[in-house]
Image (cartoon, rainbow, N blue to C red):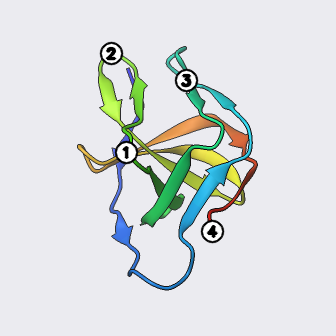
């Protein structure tokens, strides 16, 4: 089962700032449920808002999921260039990772 807590997503206003990131290499993420997910090299993610735990990024052109007892659509929650957890948009919940995952990404031009 995925551990969650209520989270309110504060959406960012569209701006001229570049709100998209692209991963430089594959990033394996071991979930607390025992499952592993991979953030694919060259995948693009768009910053859509914030939760108290960090910035929220939605995948561009695809759907990303995490698994526990059920499969949940998930967005990344990033703080200080580390993946700290996931925002679950269908439930308006935050799911933390017990160990943050360092991320290497650049902006998309």
- Look at discs 4 and 2 and give the one toward the viewer: 4
Residue density around tag 1, few if under 14, some if 14–19, many if 20 or more, within 10 Å: few
Judged from the image, the secondary structure of the residue bearing numbered disc 4 is loop
- Look at discs 3 and 4 and give the one toward the viewer: 4
Note whether 65 is above or below 88 in the view shown. above
The alpha-carbon separation of the residues under discs 2 and 1 comes to 16 Å
Residue 60 in the image, given as x and y percentages of width and height = 43, 51
Quadrant for the N terminus in the image: top left
Note whether 12 is above or below 39 in the view shown. below
Dot label at residue 5 = 1
Q: Which callout, 3 or 2, points at the residue further toward the start of the chain?
A: 3
Residue at image coords 70%, 39% = 101
Q: Which callout, 1 or 3, points at the residue further toward the start of the chain?
A: 1
Quadrant in which residue 62 is drawn: top left
- Look at discs 2 and 1 and give the one toward the viewer: 2
The alpha-carbon separation of the residues under discs 1 and 3 comes to 15 Å
Q: Which residue is mark 3?
A: 32
Q: Which residue is mark 2?
A: 69
Q: Which callout, 3 or 4, points at the residue further toward the start of the chain?
A: 3
- Look at discs 1 and 3 and give the one toward the viewer: 3
Quadrant in which residue 29 is drawn: top right
Residue at image coords 55%, 81% = 17
- In the image, 49 versus 52, the foreground residue is 49
Residue at image coords 60%, 34% = 40
Q: Which residue is mark 4?
A: 109
């Amino acid at each position: 089962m995925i551990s969650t807590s209520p989270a309110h997503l504060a959406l960012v206003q569209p701006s001229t700032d570049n709100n998209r990131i692209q991963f430089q290499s594959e990033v394996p993420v071991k979930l607390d449920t025992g499952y592993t997910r991979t953030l694919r090299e060259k995948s693009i993610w768009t910053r859509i808002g914030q939760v108290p735990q960090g910035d929220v990024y939605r995948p561009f052109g695809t759907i990303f999921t995490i698994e526990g007892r059920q499969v949940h659509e998930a967005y990344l929650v990033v703080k200080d260039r580390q993946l700290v957890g996931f925002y679950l948009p269908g439930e308006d919940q935050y799911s933390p990772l017990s160990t943050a995952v360092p991320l290497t990404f650049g902006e998309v031009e």
